[in-house]
Amino acid sequence: MESYSQMIVSPFFAKLPPKKPKASDKVSCIPFPPLQSTSFGLVQEQLSHDPFRLLIAVIFLNKTRGSVALPVFYELMERYPTPADLAAANQEDVVEIIQHLGLQNQRAKKCINLAKAWLERPPEKGKRYRVLHYPKKDDGKDVSLGDIVGEEDKRVAWEIGQLPGIGVYAIDSWRIFCRDKLRGLPTGLPKELTSEAKKEELQKEWTRVLAGDKELRAYLRWRWLRNGWVWDPVSGERKKADEGELAKADKGGVIYEGNAGDMVVGNAKGEGPDAVKAEREVGEEDGGRESGESENMIAEPKTGDARQNAGEEAEAMTAKAAT
């Protein structure tokens, strides 16, 4: 019997898989929308226009479920809507807002320090800084601490490398959703996947990210499939998707990810939230970002309309906090 390390369950499939993974395997219930959808459903998509808020959000999403973390994030942004407001905040006041998330003292300090650093040296095009061992081991070792690496310099460095408390998950999120805008390139999903749009997509930063986080990886699989490719999250290699793979993915579904990064799209039996709940319970013992519940989804919509409404609600909350 083939073993799988992770399963992504979508309400867009009518059934559950005929064979469940072992209880010891990691299982994620991440809605995998049809390929024609204009949003995958991650909160990072809604915050892509505001990289500072995106970085604050992922501080909360790391090791905390989105259903718990995101309301607190929006409350914090309503109280401190700008980097200057948050930089001037009293740490005890921030702790009071976020205390039930856990790690409140460390997170409050991290948020305030990030805001201060953002004011002092915000990300700028053509100014990159080292991040040791990212994305590969030994990357950044040829850049001295504090050095500014120019745009034409071939050394590996990043425009947010000077910011404190930025880990792999944060950098991956920023690269996928924000870096192209900073560099003056088109951002977001193309409204129509014309041949020209697909060609343009392949020039974007998200195509170079090998994310370790299960939801970012699921997003990247979906986005590659939208462009007609089956993508290997371990090697970054891709192959043309055949008609059968695209047809299954276009309906949404259960995506099994093998230990070697292979992907199998499955059909199933049973439907509805009870079935999804049953699958989610497998692998929830580990907690944190490896738990069965989706971490950074805007919501857990059961239909395309519900997903769109969830995205609109998140945008409205962001706009409210910014005013």
Image (cartoon, rainbow, N blue to C red):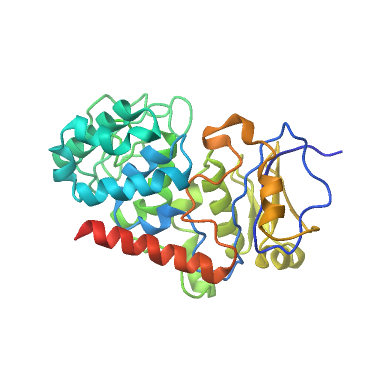
Q: Position of residue 67 (x, y in %)?
A: 46, 47
220 displayed left or right of 151: right
Q: Nearer the viewer, residue 217 or 288?
A: 288
Q: Which residue is located at x 51 percent, y 65 percent?
A: 307
In the image, residue 109 sits, relative to residue 178, either above or below, namely above
Please state, as top left, top right, bottom left or bottom right, where the C terminus lies in the image: bottom left
**Does residue 59 appear in the picture of this structure?**
yes
Image spot of residue 88 (x, y percent):
12, 38
Task: Using the image as rendered, state which of residue 39 and residue 268 is in the foreground.
Answer: 268
Q: Residue at x 71, y 45 (%)?
A: 262
Q: Is residue 66 left or right of residue 180?
A: right
Snapshot quadrant of residue 72: top left
Residue 165 on image: x %, y %: 32, 31
Residue 223 vs residue 321, the one in the foreground: 321
Query: Residue 71: image x %, image y %?
Result: 37, 49
Against 311, residue 102 (above or below) is above
Residue 163 shows up from this direction = no
Count of labels in the image: 0
The quadrant of the picture occupied by the N terminus is top right
Image: 46 above or below 62: below
* Residue at the spot 63% in from the left edge and 59% down from the top edge: 229
Q: Is residue 52 above or below residue 133?
A: below
Q: Residue furthest right?
A: 1
Image-based side of 82 in relation to 14, left or right:
left
